Image (cartoon, rainbow, N blue to C red):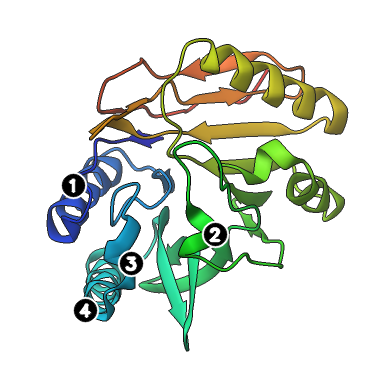
Amino acid sequence: LAQINLCVGDISANTKHIISYIEKARANSVDLIVFPELAVTGYPPEDLLLRSGFIKQVELHIDELCKLLPASLVVLFGAPSASSDTLFNSAYCIHKNKIAHLYHKQSLPNYGVFDENRYFTAGDKTLVFEHQGRRIGVLICEDAWVGDPLQRTCQLNADLIISLNASPFQSGKFQQRLDLYRNHSLEHSIELLYVNAVGGQDELVFDGGSFLMNTNGSIVQQLPFFEDCQVLHTRPCD
């Protein structure tokens, strides 16, 4: 789990930050590392997404990541992805120096501080991939709150769901996250990995608190709040 502090719009610095954590992971023989939602651009990039040059820079830096990453390491991170004139809020899975899987966020929040419908098109496909003998499903933030994307992922026999998030702090929000994910884990008997961003962007503050939850709804491992950090999970969920 790589819970990192991102700077909105600074694609180059964010990519370097991602690479630095990947180097730490490689040094510790990690086989999969997960970063937050829109890690390459920071959250929320807002009208920067309307600039074609900005999206081109995202694509160039993702190409750079593909070339630089160790072939054995699976890297999962968030970034915009473009197809023709359509833009998605996506999760990239890089393995063996190429984009092995691409998931598009299905539930786009459009309330409070969120304005994703203005920029993104909702995805309509579920992603479950196999790695190290596990069937891993991928969600992005709001996908876990509305229920349907998670339900469809479980129907494809995922035994671990990884959720990439850029969820701002507000009073009582962490307990809401725990309650929601605990209900999911108990209902579907599934392990859940929640990875959040940290840091501040204008009036938004991202509090981290990333965690791994087992099938009994218990927290197996949790990262601190408001701290840019990484944790190596080496023991089974029990």
Which residue matches tag 1? 17
Q: CA distance from mark 3 to mark 2?
A: 12 Å
Which residue matches tag 2? 117
Q: Amino acid at mark 3?
A: Leu
| Image quadrant containing the C terminus | top right
Number of the front mark, 3 or 1: 3
Q: Secondary structure at mark 4?
A: helix
Asked whether 225 or 238 is in front, the reply is 225
Apparent side of residue 134 relative to residue 119 in the rendered image (left or right): right
Which residue matches tag 4? 53
How far from the left and from the top, in percent, is residue 11? 19, 59
Q: CA distance from mark 4 to mark 3?
A: 9 Å
How far from the left and from the top, in percent, is residue 103? 57, 63
Give the residue drawn at x 58%, y 42%.
162
Q: CA distance from mark 3 to mark 1?
A: 21 Å
Q: Residue 176, relative to residue 27: is it above or below?
A: above
Q: Which mark is first along the chain, 2 or 3?
A: 3
Q: Amino acid at mark 1?
A: His
Q: Which mark is first along the chain, 4 or 2?
A: 4
